[in-house]
Image (cartoon, rainbow, N blue to C red):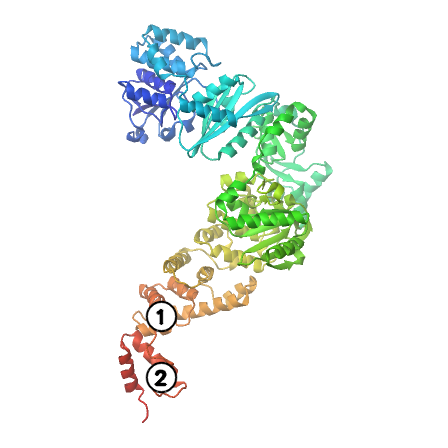
């Protein structure tokens, strides 16, 4: 099957080129990849169309053997037709007038010319091959010419476009039809929108070039927005204009430039769009209007500047080391040559980067004899000698890579450091933004204000509390920040009621002032300079002093030193938890993101902030797995490598304790802990809980049955607490001996009350399951006495490990019915009836309950009759 298609939101050039292409491929089917512009839709309705366009949904994509794409070469712009590119033996033919761009498809046939419209390319082919066209086809191609060249006024218009139009007129193109559909007059509504767009505009001066950026929001899609932008540009005589419009769930970027210094096509490409140097567009779906504007401003600074190539900045020759040297030897090289990063070279190829910071930490932890490959960074970007200053700045400033290897075919030829870049920027003012730029530029994405997001996503009570925290801190000369999971979940639009506050100042002093202000109770931890404020109503606020954690040895508890918020955030476990929000009144709601953490949130990646993170605190291994599975994220490559290294070092056995148990408990408390348990098994972490633990099919089945039992219990909506982590831990340890369970509790410093519960339930459940599997048919009263006194967790554990259906049904019967049954006659009744108080009461009541459970005693009368017969009173 052959198919002719074009880009999404097709215009006249797209459609005319498709119709023209069918004259070259008469067996091909015409099909749009998506929607069309308004005037094109109007042309469909009002004209008697003789072209047979098919709906994409009617085309079996897997049957397409030849795909003809016109007016674009970007796979991202042809919608679901991009799936055809994976078809075996697919033949791809491309016809396009846009300049080459990264991500362009490569075709078996490519006809590409930088002219004003793709229609011009087909006209030239028709003239060369003497292919005739009729008046309707000539008129359609003429509309394409007029639309894409702005009636031959755009700077992209070429002599070839004018020659093509001349030929189309000779073929009978009807200009009155062209003017009917290619209109440049604004409607009353469009004039109003133009006014709003002009009001929203801001002019930036970047590299001495004035660039206008406008933004506007609509509740639904607005046709012909590009026409409004074009009119704005001509009215104000602008050289460069970028217009952002939010329409429903999408943002549309229309860009125009009259000067060669600003290539709007390159910038649109960064938004997955396309176009020419003078006219381009993009559809943005993954950010807000403000975020899109901030990204646009960063891209303008990136692209609007003189180019400087990497080979001009790089240092060479390079000091490097082979992969077989030790960490201590690598550190000696770093010190000897006064460098901060050492490239690790195998043959001529670079395989890693080793920093002085990593060396110092490893040696401090007595790991200097390990190979440098254990701690080197393997996640880094390289650049070719032809890379531009924009490429270098993106890596060093936006992605925080301080050291860039310059390579040819992965062979190291030079390096560029952050210092090299800063020296260039400081010594050459042409690379710095002008004063006007800094005055007008919106805040960086990493310092954007989240006040609106806070008020929309967080309840009013919490927002007022955050404001109060900032006001109290301001009054006593401190700076307050909300940090960690609260900020992360706010950006993910997820509720989080755990409020962690960091104070630049003295956390304990602040906590006391806050408790005094709100009538709360404060508990302090002087050693760590932290506190917890319990507010009226039960809400808790954890307060810490901005600190840098310094570990005396691997897996040690941290020693606290005073430091800034940046250092406090840097010592946190993962990048996604290393953001903060200003709470002081003068900067309330401002996001603090030193490490580009938002990128990892967007990319759904769990990444550590430094290479020895897991070595210093192995509990982070459990947290990494918990976050990964709970949020559906993935571990970064370097993070996964360092996690595996930490497991190999057997750090768990150096300093175990309650902190490890708390992390295990949190994993097993997740709504579905099974994926995390499986991940732990993949990393060979289960063996650190107990050496015999192996996630074989039998244990997997027990855990799956546990999940079913816990889910069943939730659906009962009982007003009873059930600590599900106990059930999962018992299931995980179900095949180890009771003595080994004692050892686990001791090893992980499990609190005594939980230790007693785990041991007792394990012993009782084992006894009960033996009975259930030995005796399939039990009376209702026997089931009652078998389970009586067993906790909710114990009941669910029995349900999980019992292998016969009757046993599981017995648990269900007990939980839902039997445990609630009582005899009608109670102790007070026996006393009134004349039975003397004493041990006999318990025997009688148990006997009555059995009769009730086994449906032998239905009424009070039955029970009285039973007493007269079995326990007659002496006369």
Residue 370 position within the rendered picture, expressed as x and y whole percent measured from the top left: 63, 47
Check the image and report above or below for 843 versus 157: below
| Distance from Cα at disc 1 to Cα at disc 2 | 21 Å
Q: Secondary structure at mark 1?
A: helix
Label 1 neighbour load within 10 Å: few <14, some 14-19, many 20+: few
Q: Can you say whether 429 is above or below 417 in the image?
A: above
Most foreground residue, 47 or 757 = 47
Give residue 553's position: percent from left, percent from top.
65, 53
Residue labelled with disc 2 = 830
Q: Is residue 349 visible?
A: no
Residue 331 percent across, percent down from the top left: 69, 42
Q: Quadrant of the N terminus?
A: top left
- Residue extending furthest toward the bottom: 875
| Quarter containing the C terminus | bottom left
Relative to residue 456, is residue 821 drawn left or right?
left
Mark 2 element type:
helix
Residue 113 or residue 511, whichever sits in front: 511
Q: Give 201 or 303, whichever is nearer the viewer.
A: 201
Tell me the tag on residue 820.
Answer: 1
Q: Tell me the mark number nearer the camera, choosing from 1 and 2.
A: 2
Indicate the quadrant where residue 416 lies: top right
Callout 2 crowding tier (Cα within 10 Å): few <14, some 14–19, many ≥20: some
Q: Are marks 1 and 2 in contact (CB under 8 Å)?
A: no
> Which label's residue is closer to the chain start, 1 or 2?
1
Q: Residue at x 44, y 11 (%)?
A: 152
Along the viewing direction, whichever of 799 and 165 lies nearer the viewer: 165
Q: Residue furthest top?
A: 170
Q: What residue sits 64% from the left and 56% below the top?
A: 512
Residue 813 location, x and y as percent?
33, 67
Viewed as shown, does residue 657 lie left or right of 727? right
């Amino acid at each position: 099957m052959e198919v002719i298609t074009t880009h999404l939101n097709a215009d006249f050039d797209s459609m005319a080129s498709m119709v023209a292409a069918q004259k070259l491929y008469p067996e091909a089917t015409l099909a749009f990849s998506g929607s069309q512009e308004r005037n094109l839709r109007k042309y469909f309705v009002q004209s008697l169309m003789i072209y047979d366009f098919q709906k994409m949904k009617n085309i079996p994509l897997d049957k397409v053997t030849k795909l003809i794409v016109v007016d674009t070469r970007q796979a991202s712009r042809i919608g679901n037709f991009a799936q055809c590119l994976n078809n075996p033996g697919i033949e791809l033919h491309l016809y396009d007038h846009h300049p080459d761009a990264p991500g362009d498809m490569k075709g078996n046939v490519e006809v590409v010319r930088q002219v004003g419209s793709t229609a011009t390319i087909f006209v030239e082919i028709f003239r060369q091959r003497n292919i005739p066209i009729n008046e309707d086809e000539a008129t359609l191609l003429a509309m394409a010419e007029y639309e894409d060249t702005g009636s031959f006024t755009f700077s992209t218009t070429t002599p070839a476009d004018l020659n093509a139009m001349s030929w189309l007129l000779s073929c009978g193109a009807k200009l009155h039809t062209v003017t009917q559909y290619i209109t440049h007059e604004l409607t009353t509504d469009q004039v109003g929108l133009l006014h709003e767009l002009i009001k929203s505009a801001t002019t930036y001066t970047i590299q001495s070039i004035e660039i206008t950026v406008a933004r506007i929001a609509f509740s639904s899609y607005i046709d012909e927005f590009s026409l409004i932008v074009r009119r704005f540009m001509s009215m104000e005589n602008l050289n460069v204009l970028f217009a952002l419009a939010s329409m429903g769930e999408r943002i549309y970027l229309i860009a125009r430039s009259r000067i060669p210094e600003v290539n709007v096509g390159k910038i649109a490409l960064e938004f997955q769009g396309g176009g020419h140097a003078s006219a381009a567009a993009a559809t943005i779906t993954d950010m807000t209007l403000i975020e899109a504007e901030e990204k646009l401003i960063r891209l303008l600074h990136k692209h609007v500047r003189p180019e400087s190539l990497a080979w001009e900045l790089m240092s060479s020759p390079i000091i490097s080391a082979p992969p077989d040297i030790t960490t201590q030897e690598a550190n000696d090289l770093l010190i000897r040559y006064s460098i901060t990063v050492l490239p690790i070279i195998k043959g001529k190829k670079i395989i890693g980067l080793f920093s002085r910071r990593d060396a110092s930490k490893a040696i401090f932890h007595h790991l200097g004899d390990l190979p440098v490959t254990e701690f080197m960074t393997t996640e880094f970007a390289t650049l070719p000698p032809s890379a531009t200053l924009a490429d270098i700045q993106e890596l060093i400033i936006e992605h925080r890579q301080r050291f860039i290897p310059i390579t040819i075919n992965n062979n190291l030829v030079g390096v560029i450091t952050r210092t090299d870049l800063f020296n260039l920027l400081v010594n050459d003012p042409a690379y710095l933004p002008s004063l006007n730029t800094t005055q007008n530029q919106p805040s960086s994405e990493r310092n954007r204000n989240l006040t609106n997001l806070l008020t929309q996503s967080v309840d009013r009570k919490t927002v007022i509390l955050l404001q109060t925290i900032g006001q109290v801190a301001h009054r006593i000369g401190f700076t307050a920040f909300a940090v960690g999971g609260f900020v992360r979940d706010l950006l993910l639009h997820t509720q989080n009621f755990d409020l962690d506050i960091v104070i630049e100042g003295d956390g304990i002093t602040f906590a006391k002032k806050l408790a005094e202000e709100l009538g709360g109770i404060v508990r302090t931890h002087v050693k760590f300079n932290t506190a917890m404020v319990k507010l009226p109503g039960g809400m808790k606020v954890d307060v810490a002093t901005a600190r840098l954690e310094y570990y005396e040895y691997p897996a040690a508890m941290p020693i606290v030193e005073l430091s800034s918020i940046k250092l406090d955030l840097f010592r946190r476990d993962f990048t996604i938890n290393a953001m903060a929000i200003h709470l002081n009144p003068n900067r309330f709601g401002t996001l603090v993101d030193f490490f580009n953490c938002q990128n990892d949130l967007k990319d759904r990646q769990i990444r550590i902030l430094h290479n020895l993170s897991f070595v210093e605190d192995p509990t982070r291994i459990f947290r990494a797995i918990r976050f990964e599975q709970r949020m559906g994220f993935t571990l970064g490559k370097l993070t996964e490598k360092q996690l595996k290294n930490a497991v190999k070092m057997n750090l768990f056995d150096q300093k175990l304790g309650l902190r490890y148990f708390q992390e295990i408990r949190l994993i097993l408390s997740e709504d579905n802990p099974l994926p995390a348990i499986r991940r732990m098994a993949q990393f060979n972490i289960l063996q650190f809980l107990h050496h015999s633990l192996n996630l074989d099919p039998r244990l997997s089945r027990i855990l799956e049955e546990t999940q079913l039992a816990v889910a069943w219990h939730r659906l009962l909506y009982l007003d009873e607490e059930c600590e599900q982590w106990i059930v999962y831990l018992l299931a995980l340890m179900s095949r180890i001996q009771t003595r080994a369970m004692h050892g686990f509790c001791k090893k992980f410093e499990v609190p005594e009350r939980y230790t007693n519960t785990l041991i007792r339930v394990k012993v009782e459940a084992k006894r009960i399951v033996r009975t259930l599997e030995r005796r399939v048919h039990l009376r209702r009263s026997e089931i009652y006495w078998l389970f009586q006194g067993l906790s909710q967790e114990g009941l669910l554990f029995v349900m999980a490990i019992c292998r016969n259906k009757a046993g599981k049904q017995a648990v269900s019967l007990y939980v839902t019915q039997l445990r609630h049954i009582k005899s009608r006659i109670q102790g007070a009744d026996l006393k009134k009836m004349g039975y003397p108080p004493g041990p006999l009461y318990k025997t009688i009541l148990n006997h009555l309950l059995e009769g009730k459970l086994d449906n032998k005693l239905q009424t009070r009368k039955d029970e009285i009759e039973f007493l007269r017969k079995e326990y007659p009173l002496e006369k």
